[in-house]
C-alpha cells in the first residue's frame, strides 16, 4: 500500500467456527398438512402436490452466532483504541478501502479450512462495522495464512491486519464516515 500506510491489528481468540459448515435447517410443512387436510385417502397426485408445498428454512449456525456475540465487544474495544490513537489523522470506522491479512495460529494438529475461517472473520468485521463490507471493492487484496503451534499456544488465535492507504493523501477513498 506504499509508505505512510497505517496497519491496524485486531486479535480474536478461541474456536473459530465456520459459518457455513454447520447450518441448521427446519422443514416447514404447514401448507402441505393444510392441503392434505383430514383426507382418509391420498392419491399420488395429491401427495406430489403436497411435497411441492414443503420448504426448507435455514436457521444458521448457532455456534457462529455465539462467536459473533462473544467477540463483538472485544473488537469494539480494539476499534475504540485505534479511533482514539489515529482519529486525528482521519481514521473513521467503518473503513471503506483496505488490504486484509489474516494469520491463523492453531493450537493443535486438527486440519483447518482457512477459506471458511476467513469468511467468519470477514463477516465479524462487517458485523462490528470495522469495515464497510467484505467485497473486493473494500477489502483488496486479501491474504490468509495458517500455521500449527501445537504445544506452544493454548488457544487458537486470529491476527487480523487491516492496512489502510495513507490517511492524509487519500482520505476520500480510504475512509468513510
Image (cartoon, rainbow, N blue to C red):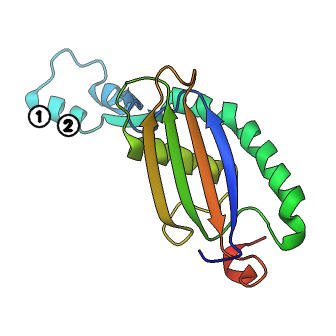
Q: Residue furthest top?
A: 40
Residue 147 x/y as whole percent: 43, 38
Residue 11, placed above or below residue 34: below
Q: Helix, strand or loop at disc 2?
A: helix
- Report how far apart the C-alphas of labels 1 and 2 lie in the structure: 6 Å
Residue 138 x/y as whole percent: 57, 69
**In the displayed structure image, the side of residue 145 where residue 101 appears, left or right:** right
Q: Give the quarter of the figure containing the C terminus.
A: bottom right
Residue 20 x/y as whole percent: 41, 39
Q: Quadrant of residue 111?
A: top left
Circles 1 and 2, Cβ within 8 Å, touching? The answer is yes
> What residue sits right under mark 2 in the picture?
49
Residue 9 x/y as whole percent: 68, 51
- Mark identifier at residue 45: 1
Number of other residues with Cα within 10 Å of mark 2, as a class: few under 14, some 14 to 19, many 20 or more? some
Residue at 60% across, 44% down? 159
Amino acid at each position: 500500500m506504499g509508505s505512510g500506510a497505517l496497519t491496524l491489528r485486531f486479535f480474536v481468540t478461541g474456536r473459530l467456527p465456520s459459518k457455513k459448515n454447520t447450518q441448521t435447517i427446519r422443514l416447514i410443512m404447514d401448507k402441505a398438512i393444510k392441503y392434505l387436510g383430514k383426507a382418509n385417502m391420498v392419491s399420488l397426485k395429491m401427495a406430489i402436490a403436497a411435497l411441492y408445498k414443503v420448504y426448507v428454512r435455514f436457521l444458521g449456525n448457532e455456534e457462529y452466532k455465539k462467536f459473533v456475540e462473544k467477540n463483538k465487544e472485544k473488537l469494539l474495544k480494539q476499534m475504540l483504541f485505534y479511533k482514539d490513537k489515529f482519529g486525528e489523522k482521519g481514521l473513521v470506522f467503518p473503513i471503506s478501502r483496505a488490504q486484509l491479512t489474516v494469520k491463523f495460529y492453531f493450537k493443535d494438529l486438527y486440519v483447518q479450512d482457512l477459506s471458511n475461517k476467513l469468511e467468519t472473520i470477514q463477516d465479524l468485521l462487517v458485523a462490528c462495522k470495522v469495515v464497510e463490507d467484505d467485497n473486493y471493492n473494500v477489502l483488496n487484496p486479501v491474504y490468509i495464512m495458517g500455521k500449527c503451534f501445537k504445544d506452544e499456544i493454548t488457544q487458537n488465535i486470529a491476527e487480523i491486519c487491516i492496512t489502510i492507504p495513507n490517511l492524509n493523501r487519500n482520505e476520500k477513498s480510504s475512509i468513510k464516515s
